[in-house]
Amino acid sequence: MRNHSRQDLFRYLRGDLSEPEKKRVEGHLKTCGKCNEFLAFVGNFNTTLKEMAEAELQSETACPNPGSLVAFQAGELDEKTARLVRQHTVFCKDCLEELYLLRQAEESRPIKADTSVARTSPTEWRRFVEKLQDSVVDLGRKYGLNTLIGPYRILSEVPRFGQHMRGAYFKKPQIASKSIQVEVGKNLYAITVATSEHADRIMCEVSTLRQSAKRPLDISVHSASGEELNTARTNEDGFSHFAVSGRSLPDELLLLTLNLEHAEQHVLFHVPLEKLSAISKLSYTERTIVELVAQGFGTEAISKKISVSQQAVKEHLSSIFHTLGISDVAALEHYAADFGPFNRKGE
């Protein structure tokens, strides 16, 4: 049975569910450990209500920034600031859920570095990469925000480089992007990987979310066969960006090794360059049509949404089929719904 939505659980705690809804949730709670764990976590915060003076109970305080929530979860805030965050979180279900997700991420054990193998040959590197396949981050897949992939959590799936990147090439359009949360030692980082508009360049960004140890993070980038593609180091602001050529990834796998003195973490990305390259040949209108197909719209509905005739939509679809090597609308719908860059429903 699937987990109940957080909204249902919050309404259950507040007593806002109808009797049939309440019975359904309670029946689910008898068999769902994850939902019970979340309710216990929320209940722990609700006990704060009894500890606060009436003057402290202010529901309309501003949400703390993400860094403060990370520091609160890590126990790194001073007592006064931590109390303010806790007081706010009692009333803000969004911040409360964010803290719960942070706790889950911390409890997920990170992959340990394999220091027993020198990994000097392509064969040894491939064996090492195979061990990381269970937690590979696929740029062509739609996960959903806050999804845990092994020890990593999805922070964003929409390209966002334009407002952060300092190199001119980072400001061009991207096709696919993933931002994940990664822990190295006691430090917490956001790692973003995206492909350029023509899928010929892979761009990476590292930014620091929590810094217990104020030391630079060393980053090395390898192919699955062990070829070193680039190296970088975070600056005094805890930030770094770099890029590699898509031609350097014949197997479409990109391995980032993050090193902080004695702590090391490895993150494996799958970059479906062949598919992305085909997508890059589609026009803006054709990409829009594919996104609408992924959301279940038919020819007539698509023609109304983009203000063209149904015949024009059919002609665009014929061009899309040829470019992507797809035979009909049913095959395109399956392709688009399965492929993250097109499946944008709900964003």
Image: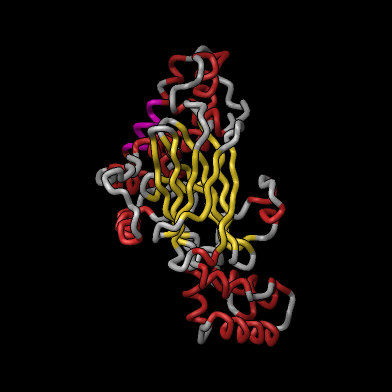
Residue at image x 54%, y 25%? 88
What x and y, as percent, mark residue 327?
A: 51, 87
Q: Quick check: can you spot residue 104? A: yes
Residue in the foreground of this view, choosing between 19 and 271? 271
Identified at 52% across, 33% down, the residue is 216
Give the percent coordinates (x, y) of residue 137: 44, 55
Q: Is residue 259 above or below residue 340?
A: above
- Determine if the magenta segment contains residue 162: no
Q: Which residues are magenta?
A: 37-44
Residue under the point 69% across and 51% down? 162
Which residue shows up at 32% across the image and 42% down it?
112
Q: Toward the viewer: 110 or 22?
A: 110
Left or right: residue 262 compared with residue 288: left
Name the residue at the front extreme: 120
Locate the N terminus and report the quarter of the image it occupies.
bottom left
The image shows residue 86 at horizontal and vertical percentages of 49, 23
- Horizontal side of residue 314 vs 9, given as left or right: right
Relative placement, left or right, of 4 versus 78 is left
Asked if residue 40 lies in the magenta stretch, the reply is: yes
* 185 with respect to 239 (left or right): left
